[in-house]
């Protein structure tokens, strides 16, 4: 007879999200997770399979519930609007007082002794997909005359990603929303006219 689960999965995922966000993937141990969730290691493995599988669930929820706000910026009518809204929305997310500062995905992407792990490949795949979506949007803007013919859509997409990562690190280091907004304004001075 199967044992009844004595904890709720969604609150446990929220707890894990907070731990991964604050500590990073590698510095969050199984002991940290089970202690914070109030469960035993066997219950953890029964519910989630592994730390990596739990992290994938955390990441899926984070992308859906948090980064979707920034992803929606891709629907702005101009390429510059896409860039500006993406970065401003990231600044808002990274300085949300209800969450740890910065970005869960960026915090968990920091290099370590073992950089060749499946979750790092997953994070890289997600970054590449985001860059491609931005690049394709900027190509469309270029075809519509919204960007100059000599603009490089792929380089502009990378610019947005790199500035976004920098915003996450700055927020994690104590930068305020106002600080990040000023950084976005400065970064957009490089946008092609």
Image (cartoon, rainbow, N blue to C red):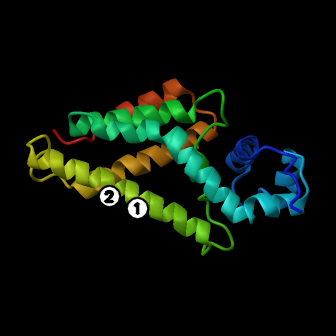
Q: Position of residue 30 (x, y in %)?
A: 83, 60
Task: Note whether 31 is above or below 174 in the view shown.
Answer: below
- What residue is drawn where x is 66% and y is 57%? 55
Position of 9 compared to 162: left or right?
A: right
Mark number displayed over residue 128: 1
Kindly state the secondary structure of the residue where label 1 is placed. Answer: helix
Q: Is there CB contact under 8 Å for labels 1 and 2? A: yes
Q: Position of residue 107 (x, y in %)?
A: 62, 51
- What residue is drawn where x is 53% and y is 65%? 122
Q: Position of residue 134 (x, y in %)?
A: 31, 50
| Outermost residue, front side | 1
Task: Note whether 80 is above or below 123 in the view shown.
Answer: above
Kindly state the secondary structure of the residue where label 2 is placed. Answer: helix
- What residue is drawn where x is 20% and y is 55%? 152
Q: Is residue 71 visible?
A: yes
Q: Quadrant of the C terminus?
A: top left
Give the residue pinned by disc 2. 132
Position of 149 compared to 125: left or right?
A: left
Q: Is residue 189 visible?
A: no
- What residue is drawn where x is 50% and y is 24%? 178
Q: Nearer the viewer, residue 42 or 129?
A: 42
Position of 161 compared to 137: left or right?
A: right
* CA–CA distance in space, label 1 to label 2: 6 Å
Estimate how packed mark 1 is, as few (under 14), some (14 to 19) or many (20 or more) residues with alpha carbons within 10 Å. Answer: some
């Amino acid at each position: 007879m199967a044992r009844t689960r004595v904890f709720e999965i969604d609150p446990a995922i929220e707890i894990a999200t907070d731990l991964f966000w604050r500590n990073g993937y590698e510095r969050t141990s199984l002991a940290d997770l089970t202690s914070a969730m109030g469960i035993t290691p066997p219950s953890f493995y029964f519910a989630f399979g592994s730390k990596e599988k739990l992290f994938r669930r955390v990441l899926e929820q984070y992308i859906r519930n948090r980064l979707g706000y920034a992803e929606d910026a891709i629907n702005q009518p101009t390429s510059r609007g896409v860039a500006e809204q993406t970065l401003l929305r990231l600044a808002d997310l990274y300085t949300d007082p209800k969450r740890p500062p910065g970005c869960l995905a960026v915090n968990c992407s920091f290099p370590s002794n073992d950089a060749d792990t499946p979750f790092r490949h997953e994070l890289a795949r997600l970054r590449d997909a985001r860059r491609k979506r931005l690049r394709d949007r900027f190509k469309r803007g270029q075809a519509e005359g919204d960007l100059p013919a000599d603009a490089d859509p792929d380089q502009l997409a990378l610019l947005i990603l790199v500035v976004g990562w920098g915003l996450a690190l700055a927020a994690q280091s104590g930068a305020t929303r106002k600080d990040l907004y000023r950084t976005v304004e400065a970064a957009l001075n490089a946008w092609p006219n």
